Amino acid sequence: MAANSSSTGSKSSSSGSGKQSGLTPEQVVSTFQRMRQEQRSMASKAAELEMEINEHSLVIDTLKDVDPSRKCFRLVGGVLVERTVKEVLPALENNKEQISKIIETINTQMQTKGRELTEYREKYNIRLVSEGEADSQGQTAASTQSSEGGGSKSGTGVLVS
């Protein structure tokens, strides 16, 4: 997931728009990559919480059909405690609601981060390798592999830096 400045670096540092913030091309790219990594980690956390909601839903659906006075066990802070279904069910439903709210917050933050990334890309004219350069590099790699007898055409989109 490498990003490259569309200019060679000396070109952007000598232009007026490149000196607005005084950042070197390497700093711009590293900041962009950091921002993308933050967005990826938010997406990962949201997916993890979605899985947790699915687990909560499964347990809630199972416990709804059970006698409320029946004994059940719940893991609280690493300790297994004995409760009744009527005590555990409302807590699970409350947890599920709270997790849903957290997911909504994370999704909002991801959208905001996405807008920031877009603005940053436009400000510093950043192109991702997969946006045009990879096509020509992938074709070159595929033709090199086939001419060398590699025969594999799955080399597109690979960048070694």
Image (cartoon, rainbow, N blue to C red):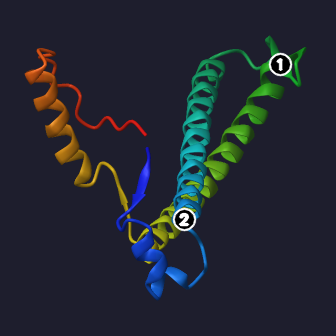
Mark 2: secondary structure: helix
**Residue 122 as seen in the image, left or right of residue 158:** right
Question: Can you say whether 30 is above or below 135 in the image?
Answer: below
Residue 30 on image: x %, y %: 57, 56
Q: Is residue 28 left or right of residue 126?
A: right
Q: Image point 44% across, 71% down: which residue?
A: 10
Identify the image quadrant of residue 51: top right
Q: Quick one: which residue is furthest to the bottom in this view?
A: 16
- Label 2 sits on what residue type? Val
Residue at 49% from the left image edge and 65% from the top image edge: 117
Q: Badge 1 is on which residue?
A: 75
Disc 2 versus disc 1: nearer the observer: 2
Which residue in the protein does label 2 denote? 28
Badge 2 vs badge 1, beta-carbon distance below 8 Å? no
Q: Quadrant of the N terminus?
A: top left
Which mark identifies residue 60? none
